[in-house]
């Protein structure tokens, strides 16, 4: 199963086209993602901004008041379509791609790591590397 060419919100009014493969696939545990996306862990892929395009509708955008983050969502159904992180990458929630692929996340989008695991609020029992900070930092010791 390959990466879907497009993803859409629940009501179908906003659609995104996905280009090249994502630059990172991770479960993020940082306090910023937990707060901004209202989730204990953000399961997402990060893409170069040019590789994710809005092809239908116009999502509403909200910029974080204090951090270099924003999110875009469907004004009709409210579904989160993507975010932008401090590096300018487009962050696509895994749920969108899983739904576009018929319910299962394509292996090409499966998370490869946990980021900011030192900030976690829940333990995850899997074999993925658990970086305490970013992916260039130390790993959780077994």
Image (spheres, helix red, strand yellow):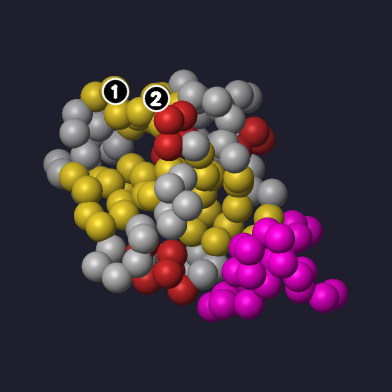
When asked about the image quadrant of residue 126, the answer is bottom right
- Residue that badge 2 annotates: 17
User: From which residue to which does the magenta span run?
Assistant: 115-142
Spot occupied by residue 67 in the image (x, y as percentages of width and height) = 35, 66
The structure residue drawn at horizontal position 43% and vertical position 37%, both measured from the top left corner, is: 49
Spot occupied by residue 9 in the image (x, y as percentages of width and height) = 30, 37
Which label number is shown at residue 9? none
Residue at disc 1, secondary structure:
strand
Cα–Cα gap, marks 2 and 1: 6 Å
The structure residue drawn at horizontal position 57% and vertical position 75%, both measured from the top left corner, is: 120
Secondary structure mostly seen in the magenta stretch: loop
Q: Is residue 38 magenta?
A: no
The quadrant of the rendering that contains the C terminus is bottom right
Q: Is residue 130 magenta?
A: yes
* 31 over 50 or under it: above or below: below
Q: Are marks 2 and 1 in contact (CB under 8 Å)?
A: yes
CA neighbours of label 2 inside 10 A, class few (<14), some (14 to 19), many (20+): some
């Amino acid at each position: 199963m390959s990466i879907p060419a497009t993803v859409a919100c629940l009501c179908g009014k906003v659609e995104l086209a996905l280009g090249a493969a994502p630059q990172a696939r991770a479960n993020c545990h940082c306090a910023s993602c937990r707060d901004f996306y209202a989730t204990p862990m953000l399961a997402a892929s990060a893409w170069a901004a040019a590789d994710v395009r809005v092809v239908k509708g116009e999502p509403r955008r909200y910029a974080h008041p204090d951090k270099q983050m924003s999110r875009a969502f469907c004004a009709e159904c409210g579904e989160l379509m993507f975010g932008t992180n401090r590096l300018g990458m487009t962050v696509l929630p895994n749920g969108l791609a899983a739904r576009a692929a018929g319910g299962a996340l394509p292996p090409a989008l499966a998370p490869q790591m946990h980021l900011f695991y030192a900030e976690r609020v829940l333990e995850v029992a899997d074999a993925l590397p658990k970086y305490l900070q970013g992916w260039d930092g130390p790993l959780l010791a077994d």
